[in-house]
Image (cartoon, rainbow, N blue to C red):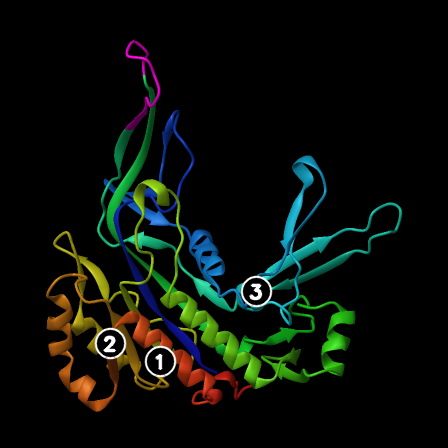
């Protein structure tokens, strides 16, 4: 079984991409303290929303349904991973109780995420600053302006990602160790159509044809390459595509690349020595080359320095190096072509 694991880094310049809870009349960004240091961050939920919102128009997002009233409301997607890519890759939970009239049946279906995303945290601590603004347009000369304040920051945000390839387009039918991802009616419908029954990690599943599974992975990779979104774009518009992406196929769900991008002397630093050490340590688990996508201009001369430090690994094909968009789209094309179909299989199934 193969996972695509790695890390993405976003470059935020004077931005406020993810709002936290307000403090009085000041709009706050999400942040946390570790000792004396403050780290702004973008939550995994926000990042996943950006990816959903960045999906191409041809990929309709799963409709969101609401039930209940007041404090007992529930909101959930339609829970049809066969129809909607985001239900397949991002997971869902549906727990609806029967009403007293019997018009609605009880049902509980859930799907653990196939595409896991970590919190995007500032590599280097950097406390946000307050941007002070006023609204005075059309006011008389004797009238006081309306004051508004909000936080913003500049930081490089890094977060881990993992894509569980055997589970793409593979939906659990339920067992003693886990909930079903599909209702019996939907499962029967799928298995009577293009899906086939298989076993994955000891659980019976319905699996879509390989062409659909390739397509969904390719769409995800291309969408990450062109990701957009974030709060306060009117005041702090900024690029939200990855400035740096590190990806590798691993036979297990371990991500050994979380420490390559680190804080060194108060600056974001990409450590080629750590990458080389991790490659050697996990050589028996790597199922292909490590792909590094690095936008020119990000981190100044580090891009050229790291590339020179990895010359032998580039020459041997153990590392591939290019622009983030080029790397992600090239890997997507390889999936569509069927070059990595074996990554979808689980030999222990």
Res 231 → quadrant: top left
**Residue 35 point in image, percent of width and height:** 26, 42
Label 1 vs label 3, nearer the camera: 1
Q: Can residue 199 be seen in this view?
A: yes
Relative to residue 100, is residue 258 depicted above or below? below
**Which comes before the other along the chain, label 3 or label 2?**
3
Distance Cα–Cα, label 3 vs label 2: 32 Å
**Residue 34 point in image, percent of width and height:** 28, 44
Please name the residue that numbered disc 2 is placed on.
322
Q: How crowded is mark 1: few (under 14 residues within 10 Å), some or many (20 or more)?
A: some
**Residue 72 point in image, percent of width and height:** 68, 40
The stretch in magenta equals: 133-144
- Residue at the image point whose x is 29% and y is 79% from the top: 290
Label 3 vs label 2, nearer the camera: 2
**Which comes before the other along the chain, label 1 or label 3?**
3
Q: Can residue 349 be seen in this view?
A: no
Res 79 → quadrant: bottom right
User: Residue 209 or 157: which is nearer the viewer?
Assistant: 209
Res 28 → quadrant: top left
Q: What element carries label 2?
A: strand
Please name the residue that numbered disc 1 is placed on.
330
Q: Is mark 3 on a helix, strand or loop?
A: loop
User: Residue 243 or 107: which is nearer the viewer?
Assistant: 243
Please name the residue that numbered disc 3 is placed on.
112
Relative to residue 105, is residue 176 depicted above or below? below
| Contact check, label 1 and label 3, Cβ < 8 Å | no
């Amino acid at each position: 079984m193969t996972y695509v694991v790695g890390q993405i880094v976003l470059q935020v310049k004077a931005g406020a991409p993810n709002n936290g809870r307000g403090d009085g009349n000041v709009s706050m960004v999400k942040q946390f303290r570790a000792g004396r240091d403050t780290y702004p961050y973008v939550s995994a939920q926000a990042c996943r929303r950006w990816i959903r919102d960045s999906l191409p128009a041809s990929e309709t997002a799963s409709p969101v349904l609401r039930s209940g009233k007041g404090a007992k409301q529930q909101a959930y997607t339609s829970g049809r991973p066969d129809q909607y890519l985001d239900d397949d890759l991002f997971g869902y939970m549906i727990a609806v109780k029967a009403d007293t009239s019997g018009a609605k049946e009880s049902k509980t279906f859930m799907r653990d995420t196939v595409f896991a995303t970590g919190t995007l945290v500032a590599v280097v601590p950097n406390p946000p600053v307050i941007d002070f603004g006023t609204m005075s347009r059309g006011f008389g000369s004797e009238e006081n302006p309306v004051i508004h304040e909000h936080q913003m920051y500049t930081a490089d945000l890094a977060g881990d990602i993992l894509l569980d390839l055997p589970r793409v387009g593979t939906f659990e039918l339920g067992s003693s160790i886990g909930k079903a991802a599909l209702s019996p009616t939907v499962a029967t419908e799928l298995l009577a159509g293009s899906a086939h029954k298989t076993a994955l990690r000891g659980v019976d599943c319905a699996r879509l044809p390989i062409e659909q599974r390739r397509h969904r992975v390719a769409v995800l990779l291309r969408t990450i390459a062109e990701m957009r979104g974030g709060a306060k774009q009117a005041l702090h518009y900024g690029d939200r595509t990855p400035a740096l992406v590190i990806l590798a196929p691993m036979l297990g769900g371990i991500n050994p690349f979380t420490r390559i991008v680190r804080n060194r002397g108060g600056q974001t630093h990409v450590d080629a020595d750590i990458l080389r050490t991790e490659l050697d340590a996990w050589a028996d688990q790597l199922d292909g080359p490590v792909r590094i996508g690095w936008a020119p201009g990000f981190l100044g001369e580090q891009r050229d320095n790291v590339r020179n430090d990895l010359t032998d690994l580039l020459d041997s094909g153990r590392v591939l190096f290019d622009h983030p968009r080029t790397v992600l789209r090239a890997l997507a094309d390889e999936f569509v072509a069927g070059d990595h179909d074996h990554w979808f299989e689980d030999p222990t199934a």
